[in-house]
Image (cartoon, grey):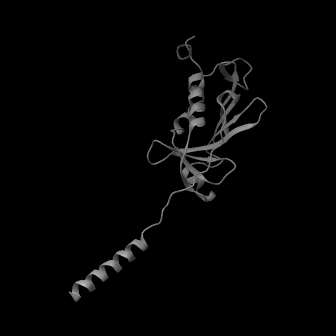
Amino acid sequence: MKKSVVALIALLLAGALWLQQQPKDTAQTLPALPTFALANVQHVEVMLDQKTTLNAQRDGDAWILADADSRQLLHVLAIEQLLTDLQHMQPKRVVSHNPENAAKFEVTASDARVILTDANKKVLLDVFVGKPATDLRSTYIRVASEDKVLTVDKTLTWQVKRTPESWFATPAAEGV
């Protein structure tokens, strides 16, 4: 009987020690991302390697190149899908608070950047869009004014890193 009591006490102490060493609750408080209404977005700029690859201006229901002499139509569905994904993206987790880690996630000033502005040139969203996260269903992003790198629940990389020509409308794509 004495041996079983000692064994039970030893087991309880070992269990308590094991529980004490387990990681605590690691739930994160996720930062809120800037919000905007799709109707308010009048200008979309996409930059790769600090060079503008898309400079789009809303023209009624269409999108045109903002810096072109001619009225060059852009692929409305491509732009609207990007805007919808940016509007509805939700943070999944904070992966870094250290600005020195930005290059690892491809969210530095020399990586992909998206800037949305309204009719008064007010910035609605300014984010660096990085590489796909390890689950391939989310993307690393960094809001331009912050050091935090987040994963969001949208696949944005392929949309932002399109070739400049792929933004142009074709008669078949636009139903013209």
Residue at 27% across, 80% down: 8
Quarter-of-image position of residue 174: top right
In the figure, 161 relative to 73: above or below? below
Residue at 35% across, 80% down: 13
Relative horizontal placement of residue 52, taking residue 4 as reference (left or right): right
| Image x and y of residue 72, in percent | 67, 19
| Image x and y of residue 107, in percent | 60, 48
* Residue reaching furthest to the right: 120
| Image x and y of residue 156, in percent | 54, 38
* Residue reaching furthest to the bottom: 2
**Closest to the observer: 114 or 125?**
125
Total numbered badges shown on the rendered structure: 0
Relative horizontal placement of residue 54, taking residue 136 as reference (left or right): right
* Residue reaching furthest to the top: 176
Residue at 65% across, 54% down: 147
Q: Is residue 171 visible?
A: yes
In the figure, 159 relative to 20: above or below? above
Quarter of the image that includes the N terminus: bottom left
Q: Is residue 75 visible?
A: no
Residue at 50% across, 38% down: 155
Quarter of the image that includes the C terminus: top right
Relative horizontal placement of residue 46, taking residue 77 as reference (left or right): right
In the figure, 63 relative to 152: above or below? above
**Closest to the observer: 126 or 46?**
126
